[in-house]
Each structure stands twice: as C-alpha cells, then as structure tokens.
Amino acid sequence: MRSGEAVKFGVLQFFSWPERRVALDTVFDRALQRIEIMDRTGYDAVWLAEHHFSSFSVCPSVHIVGTMAAARTTRLRIGTGVSLAPFYHPLRLAEEVALLDVLSGGRVNWGAGRGFARVEFEAFGVPPEESASRFRETVEIVLRAWTEERLSFAGKHFRFDEIEVLPKPLQQPHPPVWMAASSEEAIGWAAGRGFSILMDPHSEHGEIGRKRRLYAEKLAAAGYSDTGRDIPMARLVALGDTAAEAAEVARRGARWIVDSYFGAQHNPVMTRFTPAAADPVQRYLDEVILHGTPEAVTDQIRRLREEIGLDYLMAAPLSHKTFMLLTDKILPQLG
C-alpha cells in the first residue's frame, strides 16, 4: 500500500452503445475525447476493454484503439483491459502489442484475459473447455516472442520452429504485464507465475478484498512479493450532484450490465457473481457500484483503501458526468 493518502487512478474504458441512441462513431469520438482529458490530468492509464458481438462494448480491437489513443496523448499509459488471448493467434498478438508499444513510445500496459462470453467462444470456434490452456499457452508464447531472438515452441495448441517475431517491444525486456484473475484458480495460477493481476468490476467490495489477500498469500508461497506492485481494482462508479441523482445513474448502469451480461450467452460464468435468490440490480447498487456525491465517494474510496487495500482505482464511470466529477473533484484530492 502506498504511503499517505495517494491513490493511483486509471479508467476502465468501455465502449457501450446503449439502445444505439447515437451514431456508432460517436461512441469512439467521446471515448477518445475522454482519453485526451485523462492525459492532461493526473490519471495513470486508460485500460481499454475488448468485447465482441455485443453492444455492451463495441471495441473488438483494443490494439487499434490503443494506437489512436497513443496518437492523441503524450504521457498516459495505454492499457489493454484486456487482450482476450484465446481468440488470437499468439504470434499475431505478440506482434500487435509490440507494435503498439513502439508507436506509443513505450507506454503499453499489457493486460491479458481468458474471456467469458459463450457467444465469443462459439463464434471464434474456440472450445470453452480449452480456454484456460489456450490462454496460458498464448501468454507464454507472447512473452517468449518478445524476449527471444528466435522462438521455438511445442505445446498443446501451437508449435513453432525458429520464428523471428518483429517488432520487439520498446520497453525491455517487455511491457509490464497483468493477468485478469477473478476465480481462485486464476489467482493462484497468476501468483504462482509471479504475474500481477487485474481485479474485476463485478465482485462485491468485500469479495475483492478477500481475493486480494488470497493473491498476496499465493504470491508469498511462490516466493514472490507484492511490495511495489500496482494491482488495479476495477470499480464501477456513479457520481451526481446529489445522492439521489447518483443512485439513479447507478441503477441505470446496473440494469444495463445485467441485461447485457446475464443472458444465456454468458452463463454460467457471470451467474457466479450473483446468488440465485438475489436481485442482481440491487446487488450492484448495494455491494458493487461506488455511488453518491463526490464527497461521499471520496470517503468510500478512503474506507476501501483501509479495508481492502484499494490503492489503484481502475474506475469504470457509468456516465460522462461521472467521469468529469471524478476528474475535477476526486482525483485532485486522492491522486
């Protein structure tokens, strides 16, 4: 945990297209304008969310959007939140992320994840039961492609012999790496390999704290330390001039998430976050979303910093007003 009150701030940038109310290019224009604001203020990074076949987020390539973000910024780090590794050929993934690192002047934060949407696995022809093995093999190949002059590899899914993968990343030996980890198995695997983790936006605050403690224990057991690591905790945020206004923003956001994520195309993965008897929208309001006035949410962040070690907030703003209030009112106090 950092000394004093400082909290590092990033933004988990979704590209939501609710009810398709605006032209699609407006979604990207608004996101890029927001990224330019982040670069001028005190944010550490934008983390770009990759999704496929859903209007919940219409960014199928975080690497292409990352290049646009890099061209409009000078200091902001460009995070992938995440590259959905099982859906890529690993050599192509290594090339694209390395190219983004070169073009951004060495500002890439590489986050990788397995994915969870059934429709994505079916459309890309990836058996869901292979998601873990494909993900882990792809991560290994990407890291070796970045650090070895010529890559030879023989695994369950891929085989290469003396391949030179270019370009190499500008950051050496490679960009900083995070693994998206929500389940205990994923946390244990990441810790056992010494990887830092990205923590999900759907778990309750207390559950995030429990997982954070488990990660620290698993790291120590594997001979690693969490000292000095950035462990971004993704938290949905809704702000307003009044508590009632913020609660309404939070409720609309929770309903959008539930309608987008809890259909059959995502089961059974997403349903593990919400008990069968619980109202999923109310659960988001009560236990997941940080919502209220800027003063109230500032106090919530301070409390969570003490209770669960939240010292890197990867905020997912549920409205543009939320983003601006976060930037103007909370970031100057805690960042």
Image (cartoon, rainbow, N blue to C red):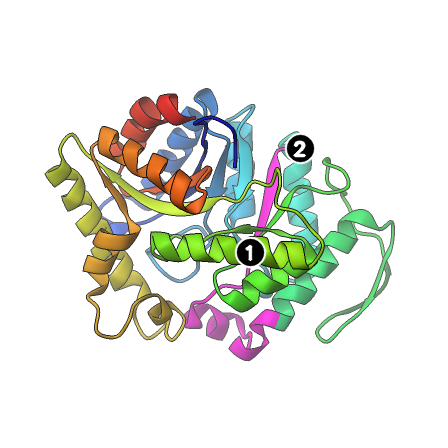
Q: Is residue 151 above or below residue 311?
A: below
234 magenta-colored: no
User: Where are the magenta residues, as a range?
Assistant: 106-132
Q: Identity of the amino acid at label 1?
A: Tyr
Disc 1 target residue: 215
Q: Residues within 10 Å of mark 2 (few under 14, many from 20)?
A: many
Disc 2 target residue: 106
Q: Is residue 12 above or below residue 42?
A: below
* Residue 134 location, quadrant: bottom right
Specify the label residue 173 is tagged with: none
Most extreme residue toward the left is: 244
Where is residue 291 drawn, in percent x and y?
23, 41
Q: Identity of the amino acid at label 2?
A: Gly
Figure quadrant of the C terminus? top left
Front residue (pair 6, 163) = 6
Write the residue at 29% across / 61% down: 260
Q: Residues within 10 Å of mark 1 (few under 14, many from 20)?
A: many
